[in-house]
Amino acid sequence: MTGREPAETDRTSAREPGPRLTVRTESRWPLAAAVVASAVLTLLLPDDLRLGPRWALPVAEGLLLVALISGDPGRISRRSTVLRSVAIALVVVLVGSAIWSTVQLIDDLIHGGSETNSANALLLAGGSVWASTVLAFSLLYFELDSGGPAARAHHMPPTPALDFPQQLSPELNAPHWRPHYIDYLYLGFTNSTALSPTDVMPLAPWAKSVMTLQSILSLMILGLVVARAVNVLA
């Protein structure tokens, strides 16, 4: 087959008569690395910025990740209601934790907290919360866009929730192109720095709402943390 992308794996189904079904999968390990990185960032946070005991969130995230890898190891291709529910639960835990940490950090900045009197401690806490937000929202986009990675591997809808440059510009569209996790990580990063869409356009209402929420959280973290750190140094 010509026009095959090197990073993708083609799986052909011989069970159904008629045209052969090509399934273009992606590795689950970038997702696993993002979840592990998020768990490490959670451990770096001060106790008052963390949702629950120090061990609770990393353990919950680890168990959900193991369930996903066990149910569909290696490359993501299995369409399952159970696995889909586990993936959504993992995203809810990550995003909920990131929002909680952001709210607590802002409360500490307003009313005074253990880390707000030291520029180094404040920048470390603020950077950890900001990075956790980027990872959490990148995984949210990854899991919700076009029905999730397993659904995208089998079929891309004519109108996705998030429109990437390869979909916007026909001359850039490689044959059978699919967005991978790195594309959603880049989306999460640019939306947290530019505070607006850059090269990826939100089409669905949920995508516009989520990108707006992420921009607001990032604006509050970057603005208040940097301002407070400068004030402490001065």
Image (cartoon, grey):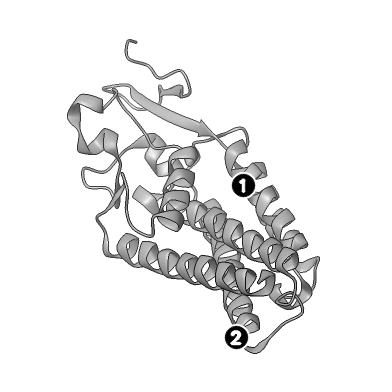
Residue type at tag 2:
Ile
| Extreme residue in the front direction | 234
In the rendering, at what x and y percent does residue 41 appear? 70, 57
Give the number of the disc on residue 110.
2
Residue at point 78% right, 74% down? 47
| Extreme residue in the bottom direction | 111
Q: Secondary structure at mark 1?
A: helix
Quadrant of the snapshot with the C terminus? bottom right
Q: Label 2 crowding class (10 Å Cα cut-off): few <14, some 14-19, many 20+?
A: few
Can you say whether 109 is above or below 19 in the image? below
| Extreme residue in the left direction | 170
In the rendering, at what x and y percent does residue 68 appear? 62, 48
The number of callouts visible is 2
Left or right for 72, reference 158: right
Residue at point 68% right, 85% down? 112
Tell me, yes or no, if residue 63 can be seen here: no
Can you say whether 216 is above or below 186 in the image? below
Mark 2–mark 1 Cα distance, whole angstroms, equals 31 Å
Residue type at tag 1:
Ala
| Nearest-to-viewer mark from 2 and 1 | 2
Q: Quadrant of residue 180?
A: top left
Residue at point 64% right, 51% down? 35
Q: Label 1 crowding class (10 Å Cα cut-off): few <14, some 14-19, many 20+?
A: some
Residue annotated with mark 1:
34
Quadrant of the snapshot with the N terminus? top left
**Is 109 in front, or is 209?**
109
Q: Quadrant of residue 11?
A: top left
In the rendering, at what x and y percent does residue 115 appear? 74, 74
